[in-house]
Amino acid sequence: MDCRCLRGHPGHVRDNPVAADPLGEALHFLHLVGRFYCRSELTAPWGMALHPMPDHLWFHVVTSGQCLLEVGQETMTLRTGELALVPHGEGHVLRSAAGVPAPRIDRLHHDYESDRYAILRHGGGGTPATLVCGAVRIEHPAARHLVDLLPRIVHLEPGEGLREDWMHSTLRLLAAEARELRPGGETVITRLSDLLVIQAIRTWIDNAPAAGTGWLGALRDPVVGRAITLIHQDPARPWTVAALADELAMSRSAFAARFTELVDEPAMRYVTRWRMYLAREWLREDGATVAALAARLGYQSEAAFSRAFKRVVGISPGAARRVAPAG
């Protein structure tokens, strides 16, 4: 991961206007990397189990018919035009009706149109259903932090979360493309799917009571939200409570109290924890050296960075690299 994506360089935050909409800034980082997309043509009885994919988000759009979605002990019915996200990479099951056998999806025959897009035809010849499903990885740490706050399932139904006309239009376009894969259809379906995932997260934030509390609630605050954005944009800057308060034209004590109240931790602890969050992601993604990480995150020495990392993460940077899952 290139640290330039954080849009800012030490000592130059004032040159880049702080986002007027910190929540929008967090959504800005929702760049999706598609790992697998599938158009499924199914006939009852049918079932399929999707294996766990840590650090990935699954989505399922029912373009015709209906199905059951089971995540752990939670079960819900998805109908035509409905969208569900399984945001935490958990294994889950889709099936036409309760109790129908559900073999692992990777053991079913797929016709691969490309290395990441497949067509699945499966079932017993009864009532049909079609789905567009996919697994995407969200790369940026700010976006992952947001996704970590989502519930086990995000379920959007027409007339509720999908109020915007363009969302209905997007679903109709997706259904039309899924009916018959035309030239360029794979690209259209993957792009539309990514838009739907981002809009589903945005809609949940707009409507869920839980989105008004904790970190997401703090992002909505005009002062604390701007402070969080400053930290995210320029994590290497030698932040202090006084420096953040100065950026926001507040007294040090008033800012410190407000930040702690809304985020539920002091500002400087958040700064350190955010830097270590970034460090873990960079260790995972690009195998950066400890020296490089220390420099990128504003530490004067490898030792100081390593001490902070172990204090926050619980293990050394080297140990974290060894246990990091393959991308």
Image: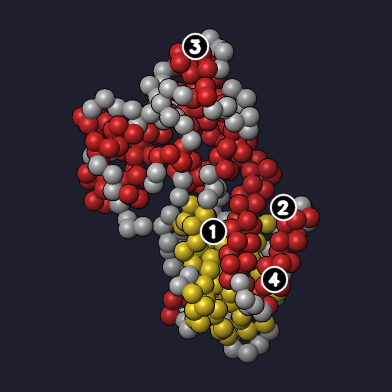
Q: Disc 1 or disc 4, which is closer to the eye?
A: 4
Mark 1 or mark 2: which comes first in sequence?
1
- Asked whether 39 or 237 is in front, the reply is 237
Position in image of residue 53 (x %, y %): 42, 61
Classed neighbour count for the residue bearing mark 3: other residues with Cα under 10 Å, few (<14), some (14–19), many (≥20): some
Classed neighbour count for the residue bearing mark 1: other residues with Cα under 10 Å, few (<14), some (14–19), many (≥20): many
Viewer can see residue 263: no
Q: How far apart are the alpha carbons under marks 2 and 3?
A: 40 Å
Amino acid type, callout 3: Arg
Assign a secondary structure to mark 4: helix
Q: How far apart are the alpha carbons under marks 3 and 4?
A: 54 Å
Classed neighbour count for the residue bearing mark 4: other residues with Cα under 10 Å, few (<14), some (14–19), many (≥20): many
Q: Circle 2 is placed at which residue position?
A: 161
Mark 1 or mark 3: which comes first in sequence?
1
Mark 2 or mark 3: which comes first in sequence?
2
Assign a secondary structure to mark 2: loop
Position in image of residue 6 (x %, y %): 46, 37
Q: Circle 1 is placed at which residue position?
A: 86
- Asked whether 224 or 104 is in front, the reply is 224
Amino acid type, callout 2: Gly
The answer to whether residue 167 is above or below residue 98 is: above
Amino acid type, callout 1: Val
Q: How far apart are the alpha carbons under marks 1 and 4?
A: 20 Å
Q: How far apart are the alpha carbons under marks 4 and 2?
A: 18 Å
Looking at the image, which residue is at 75% across and 61% down?
169
The answer to whether residue 109 is above or below residue 36 is: below
Q: Circle 3 is placed at which residue position?
A: 252
Amino acid type, callout 4: Ala
Residue furthest bottom as drawn: 125
Q: In the picture, which quadrant includes the C terminus?
A: bottom left
Assign a secondary structure to mark 3: helix
Q: Circle 4 is placed at which residue position?
A: 175
